[in-house]
Amino acid sequence: MAGAEWESLEQCLEKNLPLADLREVKRILYGKETRELHLPSGAFEAASKGDFELRGYGFEAAEEQQRRPRIVRVGLVQNRTPLPTDTPVVKQVTALHRRIEAITEVAATCGVNIICFQEAWTMPFAFCTRERLPWTEFAESAEDGPTIRFCQELARKHDMVVVSPILERDAEHGDVLWNTAVVISNSGAVLGKTRKNHIPRVGDFNESTYYMEGNLGHPVFQTQFGRIAVNICYGRHHPLNWLMYSINGAEIIFNPSATVGALSESLWPIEARNAAIANHCFTCAINRVGEERFPNEFTSGDGKKAHRDFGYFYGSSYVAAPDGSRTPGLSRNRDGLLVTELDLNLCRQVNDIWGFKMTGRYKMYARELTEAVKPNYSPNIMKE
Amino acid sequence: MAGAEWESLEQCLEKNLPLADLREVKRILYGKETRELHLPSGAFEAASKGDFELRGYGFEAAEEQQRRPRIVRVGLVQNRTPLPTDTPVVKQVTALHRRIEAITEVAATCGVNIICFQEAWTMPFAFCTRERLPWTEFAESAEDGPTIRFCQELARKHDMVVVSPILERDAEHGDVLWNTAVVISNSGAVLGKTRKNHIPRVGDFNESTYYMEGNLGHPVFQTQFGRIAVNICYGRHHPLNWLMYSINGAEIIFNPSATVGALSESLWPIEARNAAIANHCFTCAINRVGEERFPNEFTSGDGKKAHRDFGYFYGSSYVAAPDGSRTPGLSRNRDGLLVTELDLNLCRQVNDIWGFKMTGRYKMYARELTEAVKPNYSPNIMKE
């Protein structure tokens, strides 16, 4: 597995390949080239001072006669947890609020309309420990918890839609926890919430110790800047999850995640991008960065000795477009803000070319799936 | 768009990257390294003499106590149509039979157990012309047409399962045409057929001029070497198509295709590989190579002038494994045979780690899809 020091695939290719080859390699790997976005120099200075990476890219769409361009800027934030995991809970949360506040400030100067933070962004990804305290103390209300109030202020101040993935405590329904993303309108109002639909039971990621599969279906949020949805982390492995958000009308699907190198790094460039292609929409893949060490040791179900660290979150956040093109990734090892300008008209334009919805035969699949889940289902197998 | 002369992504990376970087790049792009397969030197000589590329790779699985390794060698064949498209039909078919016979001969010496040819392999991909004659004369019976009889001989002679994608004429049901793959057991018996489930209406690929969406569902074929299915060409864009083959038990899904560079080359490495990941199975992506020119000019619905050529089929056939790793691709411009050794035990091993079937919530999706296809369906959209 690559160490933290290896910065990014893109940087390596740019450095080593002759220009003509680089063009071909990028065409095959990334599709149609995304243009670099002009961002204010003050933003780069602030990013440099704040020690985070800032990148900007833009996707183009064709001009139409009946619709104006529907230009939206999305901001993807990836970051490490700044304080050790044994710092008091409130201090950790506050430090993360301050960090995100600073990055969002820069996003605002870059004209970002919709910003999305990483999965469970107010806490270390402590679910590997299977201990309850203090981790469950990071949970808060998705309606009026301190993080939601904090995000409402950000939204109002910057006229920005905020997607805030948190650990939710649902006091009105038996005090259970959920892995939730709250969507806050640029007006500051809570537009609604959506919950992680698929919960992993993989190595350090048996999160069902803490929360179960979401019960809110596949809501899509109509914002002033377009229709968005949130497919949280492990849901990216499930093509049907992306599909249902798309069927409900999502033009941008965010995928806030927390995933480590040894487990998933070679899957990372594939899955969100495939979803953008298959569903004629934009997808935004966000992963945290850095290593997190925990006070007590834990085992990982992999035959290895008990340990305190969780592997390396490899960042590499990116945006993929419905035409299969994608931005380069943010780095593997630094906090970062990826600003991407989308013309949402591209979704329908690609839909009208490729027609996956028209040719999708969903009625047949609804029928086949309905049969297939029956306990006495007999698979269609032909034998000699 | 890249010309035909640019051979392959892998070749370019191998040539230009320092070794340590190359290792990291390959890890991120291709996952766990596939080992090179030792193939007989006579096979390479025959391939060189026959002017086609020969490559061999192997995927590993862990040892188990209760099951022996289930080692299978699959052969993927990509080729150009050797004769001009205005040659008499029988001559074109015969030339393709001879070409495939020679490549299959080499596959046999490499120990291939299951071989799959490209989509509609007995003909040029003439559907762009929208003319009926002579192209419909390439259609034949999937039960006892000359190509099926030819494949039965190959199967018996080499003790090999043969997957033969053809243009089918269904004389018993109104003489209609289908885009079909026939699966022939290594005994020589026709095990059954499967039809292209999703038909494109994209630029030069409005194949619904000739045949409609398949009516055979998602059959899986139990062969002596494992359970296989065939997702023909455009079906690779539809995640539900892969899923249903997998739910019916497929361990290897072949994707015989015909697709050109300007349209799809940046999607090609993504889709079949994503399907291998999402469904815990092996997928085999096969594309033809070369340019095909037609006697009469045709337009492509792209605002460009009438022309006689069809763009460049870019080959690049590859195999992806359930753990997300993949082989390098065959070249973009040469006929080729890709021999890949699989241990089918890897499917269940990855399933037991990642658990996408267990966590897939298919019952919820069956219900949601059933609702979503109703004409009066109201999408789940939350507004302020």
Image (tube, coloured by chain):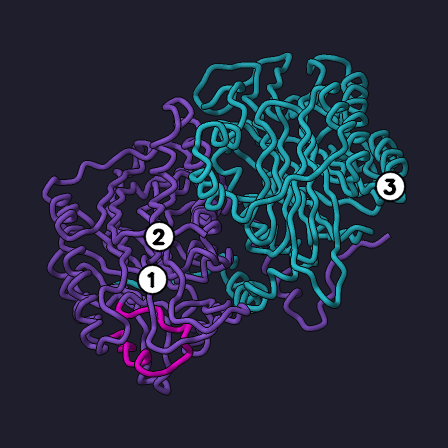
Chain colours: A purple, B cyan
The alpha-carbon separation of the residues under discs 3 and 2 comes to 50 Å
**In-front residue for pair A71/B376:** A71
Can see residue B238? no
**Pointers 1 and 2 in contact (C-beta within 8 Å):** yes
Mark 1 — on which chain does it sit? A
- Residue matched to label 1: A291
Instruction: Say the numbered circle drawn on residue A4.
Output: 2
Q: Are both tags, 1 and 2, on one chain?
A: yes
The alpha-carbon separation of the residues under discs 1 and 2 comes to 9 Å
- Residue matched to label 3: B159
Q: What secondary structure is found at the residue carrying circle 3?
A: loop
Is disc 2 surrounded by few (<14), some (14 to 19) or many (20+) residues within 10 Å? some
Is disc 3 surrounded by few (<14), some (14 to 19) or many (20+) residues within 10 Å? some
Residue, x 41% and y 42% (percent of image)? Answer: A322
Vertical arrangement, residue B295 with respect to residue B252, above or below: above
**In-front residue for pair B172/B7:** B7
Mark closer to the chain start, 1 or 2: 2
